[in-house]
Image: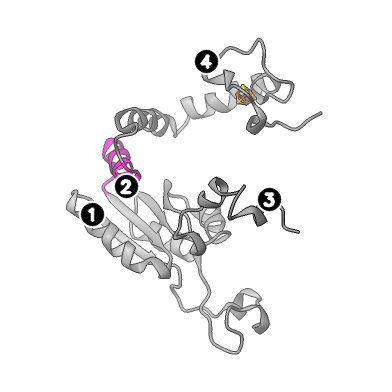
Amino acid sequence: MKPARCSDCAAPLCYLNVFEHAPAFCPSTRYEEEIREASREVIEGGLAEVARVSSIVEAAGYCKKTRVEEIMDFASRLGLHRLGIAFCVGLRREAGILADILEGNGFETVSVCCKLGGIAKEEFGLEDGEKINPGTYEGACNPAAQAMVLEKEGSELNILLGLCVGHDTIFFATTNVLTTVLAAKDRVTGHCPLQPLYLADAYYGRIKNPQ
Ligand code: SF4
């Protein structure tokens, strides 16, 4: 059986809920019952209000509001006042700007840098030669600790700001707090990770054809 491949779909029929001509790889037709069950878990579970408010925020800000504004709208409509910023040490300036913006809009903020605790990378099992600069002390990013501190500090909504690939994975896997993302880390593109996709047939051709 061909795997589900929405990325190959010529027309997203699911948008209109009409599936007569759905392709063979369409997950909407393949998992009809399971999709209803997953949806029911949201509708009848603790995320019902998040689902409702998400759609309201989407419509209210559609092509008008930036992501920062949408995050504030989302938090406001859910009645979440204390916002936690989990940021990368390389984006500490941006974290300060974000905190100022959130507080200027009436929110409280708590924020935690990725390097908190000063744990050496060796404690996470790295060999010296696997570090960015071998032979020197390098503090490890500690996303599980970021998540823990933000929870203890009463964050009602976490905002990720530039956590590394994999570190964000650990954050999502360990936090118990509602979490959204303002920016994904991409050192090479100025944190615009879609840039190489737009230029995949030109300057970033190496991504499609590594040889
Ligand atoms: S769910 Fe089906 S109709 Fe929707 S994008 Fe995927 S393949 Fe296309």
Q: Earlier in the sequence, mark 1 or mark 3?
A: 1
Please give the name of the residue rendered at 27% of the width and 61% of the height, measured from the top-left corner. Answer: 97
Q: Earlier in the sequence, mark 4 or mark 2?
A: 4
Q: Are marks 3 and 2 in contact (CB under 8 Å)?
A: no
x, y percent for residue 41: 53, 28
Query: Can the viewer see residue 144 in this picture?
Result: no
Badge 2 element? helix
Q: Are marks 1 and 4 in contact (CB under 8 Å)?
A: no
Q: Amino acid at mark 4?
A: Leu
Q: Which residues are magenta?
A: 66-81
Please give the name of the residue rendered at 45% of the width and 76% of the height, measured from the top-left corner. Answer: 117
Which of 178/187 is in front? Answer: 187
- Magenta region includes residue 67: yes
Badge 4 element? loop
Residue named by callout 1 = 101
Query: Can the viewer see residue 131 in this picture?
Result: yes
> In which quadrant will I find the N terminus?
top right
Q: Is residue 129 above or below residue 39?
A: below
Q: Earlier in the sequence, mark 3 or mark 4?
A: 4
Q: Nearer the viewer, mark 3 or mark 2?
A: 3
| Residue at the extreme front of the image, as rendered | 202
Q: Amino acid at mark 3?
A: Lys
Residue named by callout 3 = 208
- How far, Cα to Cα, is label 2 from label 1? 9 Å
Q: Amino acid at mark 1?
A: Ile
- How far, Cα to Cα, is label 3 from label 4? 33 Å
Residue named by callout 2 = 68
